[in-house]
Amino acid sequence: MLLIDAAAKPPTEDEDVPAATAGVVHTQVRLQKLDFWVRYPGYLAFELMNEYEAAQHAPG
C-alpha cells in the first residue's frame, strides 16, 4: 500500500475513472523503482548521499 500510495497521481479531469478514485498508477515502472528502493535501502542511501554532495558543490 505504501508503494501504491507513493506511485499514484491524482486523476485528471479528462480521465474516465470512477468518482471515488483517489489516485491512478499509469505505469508499473515507477512502482518497480519504488519497490527496488524499499527492498534495497543501501542503494537509496548511496544515491541520496550522491545528490546531497552534488548539491553542496553546485554553483549558485
Image (tube, helix red, strand yellow):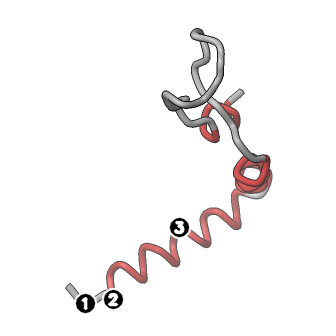
Q: Amino acid type of disc 3? A: Leu
Q: Quadrant of the C terminus?
A: bottom left
Above or below residue 30? Residue 18 is above
Between residues 35 and 53, which one lies in front from this camera angle?
A: 35
Please give the label number shown on residue 48: 3
Vertical position of residue 52 compared to residue 35: above or below: below
Q: Position of residue 1 (x, y in %)?
A: 71, 27
In space, the residues marked 1 and 3 are separated at their CA atoms by: 19 Å
> Percent position (x, y) of residue 19?
57, 10
Q: Which residue is mark 1?
A: 59
Numbered label attached to residue 31: none
Left or right: 40, with 14 as reference point: right
Cα gap from disc 2 to disc 1, whole angstroms: 6 Å
Q: Which residue is mark 2?
A: 57
Amino acid tagged 2? His
Question: Residue at the spot x=62%, y=35% of the render?
Answer: 8
Look at 69% across and 37% down and name the residue there: 25
The answer to which image quadrant residue 21 occupies is top right
Q: Residue at x 59, y 71 (%)?
A: 47
User: Which residue ends up furthest to the left in the rendered image?
Assistant: 60
Looking at the rendered structure, the kind of residue marked 1 is: Pro
Q: Which residue is the extreme one toward the top? A: 20
